[in-house]
Amino acid sequence: MYDKNIDKKWQDKWYATDCFNAKEDKDKKKFYGLVEFPYPSGVGLHIGHVKAYIGLEVIARKKRLEGYNVLFPIGWDAFGLPTENYAIKTGIHPRVVTDNNIERFTEQLKKVGFSFDFNRQIDTTDENYYKWTQWIFLKLFEKGLAYKDITEVNYCPNCKVVLSNEESQGGKCDRCDGEVIQKEKEVWMLKITDYAEKLLEGLNDVDFPERVRVQQENWIGKSTGAEVDFKLKDLDDKLTVYTTRPDTMFGVTFMVIAPEHPMIKKYADRIENLKEIEAYAVNAKKKTEFERVQLAKDKTGVEIKGITVINPANGKEVPVWVSDYVMMGYGTGAIMAVPAHDTRDYEFAKKFGIDIIQVIEGGNIEKEAYTDIANGTMMNSEFLNGKSVKEAIASMIEYVESKGFGHAKTNYFMKDWAFARQRYWGEPVPIVKCEKCGLVPLKESDLPLTLPKLENFKPGTDGESPLVEATEWVNTTCPCCGGAAKRETDTMPQWAGSSWYFLRYIDPKNDLSLASMENLKYWLPVDWYNGGMEHVTRHLIYSRFWHRFLYDIGVVPTKEPYAKRTTQGLILGSDGEKMSKSRGNVINPDDIVNEYGADTLRTYMLFIGEYDAAAPWNDNGVKGAKKFLDRVMRLDTLLVDKYETVDEEYERELNKTIKKVTEDYEAMKYNTAIAQMMTFINVVYKKGVISKEDLKKFLIVLNPTAPHVTEELWNRCIDANSMIVDATWPTYDESKIKTNTVEIAVQVCGKVKFILAHEVGISAEDLTKQVLADERLKPFIDGKEIKKTIIVPGRIANIVV
RNA sequence: GCGAGUAUGGCGGAAUUGGCAGACGCGCCAGACUUAGAAUCUGGUACCAACAGGUGUGUAGGUUCAAGUCCUAUUACUCGCACCA
């Protein structure tokens, strides 16, 4: 029986002997396996953490046994709102809360037997860590990539905090799921848009799952087209639009600008219906995300009376409308509308009775006026006629460039990163505001800029940081002129610390640099990074950005941080629903470990199904995993020094098991690896004996899944003076897996009639003779004409009559 | 609306990529051991049928000697994006 009490015995041995620690042995081949470090919340370790870590845990243990120098670290992403909210509620300082939570998490992780290198733990709230987060910020500032701007930001009124675009996807706050509003505010921004192209290109050099790559590409949202100027009639000014289809310029019948477009203010005195337009803008702003998206089909808008523009392609005068289907945040906030080609423009034109300019030709008279449906070439477009869309785009761009009213332009959907939170529990921004010198960075030697002690960390009512209250800390002197200055009171978002943590693991105690180049060169890139899908357009993109920036300034040796990325699937409650407190279907890993032992939890997590697919929890499945481990533990009763006779089937099954487990672990197909080990155990019980040598091999391959059970059995049956963690991964003998004879199905007209054994390596002709001579075939072919025989040795025999 | 993915027994899931569908586990049934239960062990378990046999991988077609696997259409669900000009 697998007695859960053996867990602690082996955990004590492992963690006391530091056997999982990465060595600084640069001659050895390295493996850097990384899992997304947890936020140490007060709730403790969740079953999802276990699922997320167990995948690479198996790989890390296997790589060690294969002789790699393995870095498999863990740390704490500890800045953030929940800790602060808890601190606000209880009055306990976030530092104390964080330390307690880290202690609890560490204990829980060790109880599952994770082989993390606990000596390299990092904590983003440790001032020796965030010193370097601040240092990177200074570098970003120095290169002009960190800037302060008054802008419309996403704001969560509930959390009282500014959010980045990535944190407010779908118009909902990442933290509280509340509605996000737009608010004008002065905040720090990071120019991630400067890196859009590099982030896109980098995806070609890494091994990411398809859907991860696609999601990042969509998020960056690259589009190519042109910016074109439309002259305002009777004014010395122009309206610039962005379009991906400059070839359709001859079909423009009106223009649309966003309600926030600056042109409205600029020509307020010329606009005859200004009141109406302002009222529309106010109304548009009030719309919630839901209204904007769900009611999208019902277009609204107002024509601007008093302003028209001239289409530079044909000199025609066109009206200008205001509508909220055009966004100020994308392109130029203004579009040229071509209802004949764009469904949105079409809907708008139809609703407001604007010209569609249709030419009767072929099937669809309303929508294909400028491209011939039959051959996809341009028509009714003067010098573009007869060209393909692609050619026409190029030639129109050439035309507008030569005439000086436009140019080719690439746009990205991704926006700059709002990099400021109005909270206490985050990294202070190392910048002071001086009346004389403006925004002045701290000297590197003055880092870290530590958080002041504060009694009250409640955020201000109107999006003010609680640090405003720390007057002694806020009032400082300017590093540049020595005059009076004030510190920045916003702190960095939680994503700051996690954007580079994988670098610090490589050299966690270095106080001269964030990590030494020598160590970085040895360990980078991260060979394998496993984490959640929810981070694809958040942490994963932020950290790639920071890493690429650090590469550009010569701090890290690789362009991309992660060579390979995988994701784990969700564990659902036993009711098939997402685990949540309110549903009461939450499984606590502690309970499973306490009742069934750590290896049972590990084995079950891996056996439950495909690793990156969601799977519901099943209590009986857990018992099944325990039963398997019990059967393994009882192998000692079958132990013999040597077999009396060589058994080919036995040899085959063992070698097959080693092969399959070796390959399946690497492909994260843990469920089939375990199935094969179960099959092997079933064979062993059938035979009733197992030799020491075979048991030894089996225990090693099972070890990454069930380290406690295998160490215990190793100690009892193999060698009491050594441990599996120091053993070597077994090899398999391919020739032992192959058999002399193989069984194939013999079909008549595609229906299986009987099974035939034949020798391996037999020719098709010989096999045909053997099949046709078989007595069992007679009843099916007697008196019938054989039309065709398909004989594939080792595969199939099919007789068509 | 656009894009990606999934669909196999009562359940979780397997199927050297076109070659015996349902590995392995759960559950269930029967038996052994037990005073009894638990645990353990043995056998059975896709469906229909008394048997012969037939039918089966969401649905409808197709290609092929042969289809869970390839093609066409279609339905349902999951995920992502969503006025991207």
Image: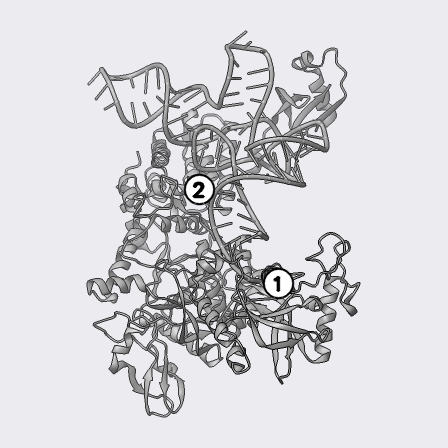
Q: Give percent across and percent down for residue A214.
A: 55, 56
Of the image marks 1 and 2, the number of the one nearer the N terminus: 1
Examine the image and state in which quarter residue A166 appears: bottom left
In the displayed structure image, the side of residue B10 where residue A122 appears, left or right:
left
Q: Give percent across and percent down for residue A495.
A: 40, 66
Q: Chain of mark 2?
A: A
Q: Chain of mark 1?
A: A
Query: Is residue A191 shown above or below A759?
Result: below
**Picture disc at residue A113:** none
| The C terminus of chain A sits in image quarter | top right
Tell me whether circle 1 and circle 2 mark residues in contact (CB < 8 Å).
no
**Foreground: A299 or A420?**
A299
**Foreground: A225 or A309?**
A309
Residue at horizontal 45%, vertical 62%? A538
Query: Is residue A314 shown above or below A22?
Result: below
**Picture disc at residue A701:** 2
* Residue type of the residue flagged with mark 1: Gly
**Picture disc at residue A353:** 1
* Residue type of the residue flagged with mark 2: Val
- The CA distance from mark 1 to mark 2 is 73 Å
Q: Give percent across and percent down for residue A3.
A: 28, 37
